[in-house]
Image (tube, helix red, strand yellow):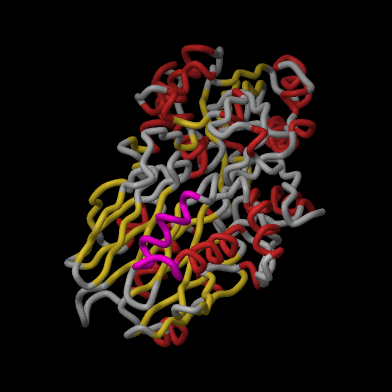
Amino acid sequence: MSDFEQKPFDTFGEECGVFGMFSSESGTLSPAVACYHGLYSLQHRGQESCGIAVSDSGVVSGYKGMGLVCDVFNEDVLNSLKGQIAISHVRYSTAGASKAENAQPLIMRYAKGRIAIAHNGNLTNAIDIRNELSQTGAMFQTTIDSEVIAHIIAKNRISSKSIEQAVIKTMKKIKGAYSLLVMSPSKLVAARDPFGFRPLVLGKIGSSYIVTSETCALDSVGADFIRDIEPGEVVMIDKDGIKSFKDNCTNQKRTCIFEYIYFARPDSVIDGVTVHDARITAGKELAIEHPADADVVIGVPDSGLDAAVGFSQQSGIPYTIGFVRNNYVGRTFIKPTQSERSSSIGIKLNVLREGVEGKRVVMVDDSIVRGTTCANIVRALKNAGAKEVHVRISAPTVHWPCYFGTDIPTKEELTANHHSVEEMCKLIGADSLGFLNKEKLCKLVNSDCKNFCDACFTGDYPIPLDEIHT
């Protein structure tokens, strides 16, 4: 398998999360410690590797490794990461193999000194740019898109007045999804791609600024939410404060709808919409579209829980806990190999027999990709004594792959491309099966669906397929 091929998981995978801080106050919260707590809050976005880079009076250094935040960092490591600026990253690989050298942030030395980069998303023209740079002598130490971005920034910095101008210029070259943090010796620069595929928010604690993937990470350090960084916007923070540059803003926002359905934590707010509320709405719409004659409603942890509550509220069927989750087993999609993913399913969830035995059950989950996981869960419920299992999915059927940072199998591997809903129902062993109508997605975000990317459901890609190197 090529490093740039997608892996055949049975559910979706996010790529990563970022957290950065510029501290204007001495003796307050250390930026490295803030990053540590922020990464804990973003651990759901990636569990393969993590890292923190700091700038201490202009000296850039860092520490990163494979594994969870709690495994990679300890008190001694954090105490060694002194500095006024820090950026950090948790990773799940979609482009680039799961290897130590691909852990982020990347720290690079170039003609103007050192920079560190942390990136969430996928470039659609990364391979083309990599090949172009290689032909001119560029050497790559990793297989990730972030290094491609770093090379372009370094090249543009030579002819630019500042690091933020180099980032603005770089955005005209790269295509695809990126929520990006760049740290120079004296500045923190954040950028969100012109479509705003991935979330990026700005916060403040005291006189210090924070930029991160989700608002839940701001909460973890006691920071106040200021606003979302706009699609196409570049924000620069230094000792003099904060500046915004909107040279690349195009008013073509297409935030990934699956951030609301699955990826983000329910306590996060993305572009003004609370993820919890979006999932409650999805459950209510499911109950209207696909009612069931049942005794209880249960949700599959974690992202199915809120939708299950919404289904219960709309239908009047009591909500109950159907599963006990082992919180020490990572989200299944984050496992980097299929064998590891399969071995983790059996110990991740255990059916709470008292909640389902002898009952007709509505089971709410967030998606069906290949169907194997859903079939295993339905079987477990029936083995625990459930009389009937009616599966309701808080997303439409998935028909198309994603090229913007979500790990979705190829069209050939997606079960909805080979089976009708009735056939899928039989394959997973359910008594009935219903999916959210794609026309109802706009209700989740209380906005025009044109502002969100739903290409995995519709095939309507914001970037033409002939411009995407697949």
Identify whether 280 is placed above or below 326: above
Q: Is residue 378 found left or right of 29 in the rendered image?
A: right
The C terminus is located in which quarter? top right
- Identify the image quadrant of residue 327: bottom right
- Between 213 and 435, the residue placed more toward the observer is 213
Q: Main secondary structure of the magenta part?
A: helix
Name the residue rendered at 69%, 43% in the picture: 469
Name the residue rendered at 30%, 56% in the picture: 219
- Between 232 and 404, the residue placed more toward the observer is 232
Image label count: 0
- Identify the image quadrant of residue 275: top left
Residue 305, x across and y down, in percent: 48, 36
Name the residue rendered at 45%, 34% in the picture: 254
Q: Is residue 175 found left or right of 217 in the rendered image?
A: right
Name the residue rendered at 59%, 68% in the picture: 103
Q: Is residue 52 magenta?
A: no
Look at the image and give the residue range highlighted in magenta. Answer: 157-172
Identify whether 355 is placed above or below 63: above
- Between 203 and 183, the residue placed more toward the observer is 183
**Can residue 100 be seen?**
no
Q: Is residue 162 magenta?
A: yes
**Can residue 200 be seen?**
yes
Residue 439, x across and y down, in percent: 50, 16
